Amino acid sequence: MKPARGVTILEDAIAERQAAEDRAGGLSRLAIPNGESLLAYLVLALQQSSAADHGFIGWIRDIANNGSCPINTATDSSRVMQVCHERGGGSV
């Protein structure tokens, strides 16, 4: 897959999650026990997932621009997590 296609797929996923987050605001919180808390966790999960995808988009662009992954993912997992966090993706 070409990097541009990967970016497009992730951007589409981000847009879908944003739409789900927008719809979640209109859901009844009374329909299920602990609905307020569950809805808050759902929205948080959607936000964190989108943030991670933004980090992956940055990574894809780095690879496309540099021709290879700038991090040895087999031996440097702490650096992978640091880069993901720097790009707004939180944790891996």
Image (spheres, rainbow, N blue to C red):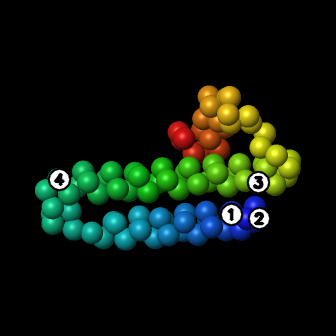
First of labels 4, 2 by sequence position: 2
**Mark identifier at residue 6:** 1
How far apart marks 2 and 1 lie (CA) works out to: 7 Å
First of labels 2, 3 by sequence position: 2
- Discs 4/2, front: 2
For this view, does 90 lie left or right of residue 77? left
> Could you say which is closer to the camera, residue 23 or residue 67?
67
In the figure, 18 relative to 61: above or below?
below
- Discs 3/4, front: 3
Q: Position of residue 58 (x, y in %)?
A: 70, 51
Amino acid residing under circle 4: Asn
Instruction: Indicate the secondary structure of the residue bearing disc 4.
Output: loop
For this view, does 70 lie left or right of residue 90? right
Label 4: which residue?
34
**Mark identifier at residue 2:** 2
In the figure, 54 relative to 7: above or below?
above
Instruction: Indicate the secondary structure of the residue bearing disc 2.
Output: loop
Q: Which residue is at a point 62% across and 41% down the rendered structure image?
A: 84
First of labels 3, 1 by sequence position: 1
Q: Position of residue 7 (x, y in %)?
A: 68, 63
How far apart marks 3 and 1 lie (CA) works out to: 10 Å
Q: Tags 2 and 1 in contact by the CB under 8 Å rule?
A: yes
Q: How would you rate the neighbour count of disc 3 (Cα within 10 Å): few for under 14, some for 14-19, many for 20 or more?
A: some
Q: Tags 1 and 4 in contact by the CB under 8 Å rule?
A: no
Instruction: Indicate the secondary structure of the residue bearing disc 3.
Output: helix
In the figure, 5 relative to 60: above or below?
below
Query: To which quarter of the image does residue 28 belong?
Result: bottom left
In the figure, 25 relative to 68: above or below?
below
